Amino acid sequence: MRAVVFAYHNVGDRCLRVLHAQGVDVALVVTHRDRPDENIWFQRVADTAAELNLSFLYAEDPTDPALADAVRAARPDVIFSFYYRAMIPADVLAIAPQGAFNMHGSLLPKYRGRVPVNWAVLHGETETGATLHAMEAKPDAGYIVDQTAVPILPDDTAGQVFEKVTVAAEQTLWRALPAMKAGQTPKRPNRLADGSYFSGRKPEDGRIDFNQPAAAVYNLVRAVAPPYPGAFTDIGGRRFIVAQARRLEGGTVPAGLRPGLHLLDGRIVAVCGDGGALRVLQLMEGSSADHASPVSATELQNIIPAKS
């Protein structure tokens, strides 16, 4: 099997290594340059390709005719996409006679679209996974080749879940490749009517509304906790990021406190709209979690009044 691989991020790194380990002839790797405004906490696929002595190129515009020419010149049997961030044009996908396949970070048909792990944590899901599926013009809509589920534990952050999904992607591809190489690719229906679709998230989506129930606030904190930008609130023109928290049992905080951050017996506590509360284990001040400094309860006393 000869392949062209579009890849980025940790899933791209691990899946590229799986192809190499199973003897797939990777003729070309296509990846992105890193965005200058992004926290690069993940593996660079360009480094992986160089380590494995694979030809690679950067493609910022997948509609550039030069990219189609490069893919065509590589003469792939198949095209793979592993966390490549751009939509690959249909005319490029059509170059591979045995099809084009994408690794998606959810259990399709659930959570089609962007940042599926973050959305799954935000919605309080207890399970997600990785799905290898055929690529069509419509995102995440082709038939399913294979998928692997992973649990989302009650206190898991999106970063922790993403680590599990990365392993699930590796397992899924490893399991699927022998049949694919033999020309017997499994085809399971991807019933879109039973699923969901979500778009990308903006930085402002991380703003905490303490009037929401404690479960919703906690899910937001987990969904965007570092290495993501973090859930935040503004106090007196200063931005504070709730980087880590835990749910508190009912009756732990005095009744009647307004929703928001409070100091109780030397602890930072977030009171929510339903009377529930979170203990804030790590509070930071800054524009995002990777550009922020820790804030202690003592330092916070000058900003919000203490209660006991």
Image (spheres, rainbow, N blue to C red):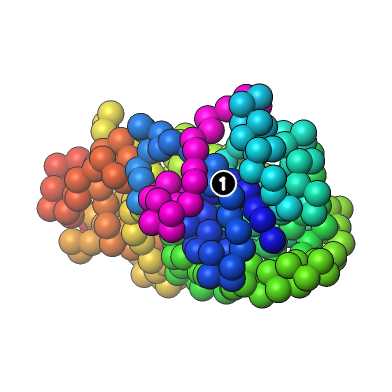
Residue ID at (81%, 66%): 183
Which of 32/120 is in front?
Answer: 32
Tell me which corner region of the image, top left, top right, bottom left or bottom right, holds residue 18.
bottom right
Left or right relative to 302: residue 233: right
Q: Quadrant of the N terminus?
A: bottom right
Residue 39 lies, with reference to residue 281, above or below; the image says above
Which of 149/300 is in front?
Answer: 149
Residue 139 lies, with reference to residue 15, above or below; the image says above
Tell me which corner region of the image, top left, top right, bottom left or bottom right, holds residue 238.
top left
Residue 265: percent from left, percent from top: 20, 63
Residue 69: percent from left, percent from top: 66, 31
Residue ID at (25%, 47%): 284
The stretch of residues the image draws in magenta is: 42-64
Q: Name the residue under label 1.
A: 28
| Disc 1 residue type (three-letter) | Leu
Q: Residues within 10 Å of mark 1 (few under 14, many from 20)?
A: many
Q: In which quarter of the image is the C terminus?
A: bottom left
Left or right relative to 162: residue 93: right
Q: In the image, is residue 36 part of the stretch drawn in magenta?
A: no
Residue 160: percent from left, percent from top: 44, 65
Residue 101 lies, with reference to residue 33, above or below; the image says below
Q: In the image, is residue 54 part of the stretch drawn in magenta?
A: yes
Residue 166 visible, this orientation: no
Left or right relative to 247: residue 27: right
Which of 128/17 is in front?
Answer: 17
Residue ID at (28%, 62%): 281
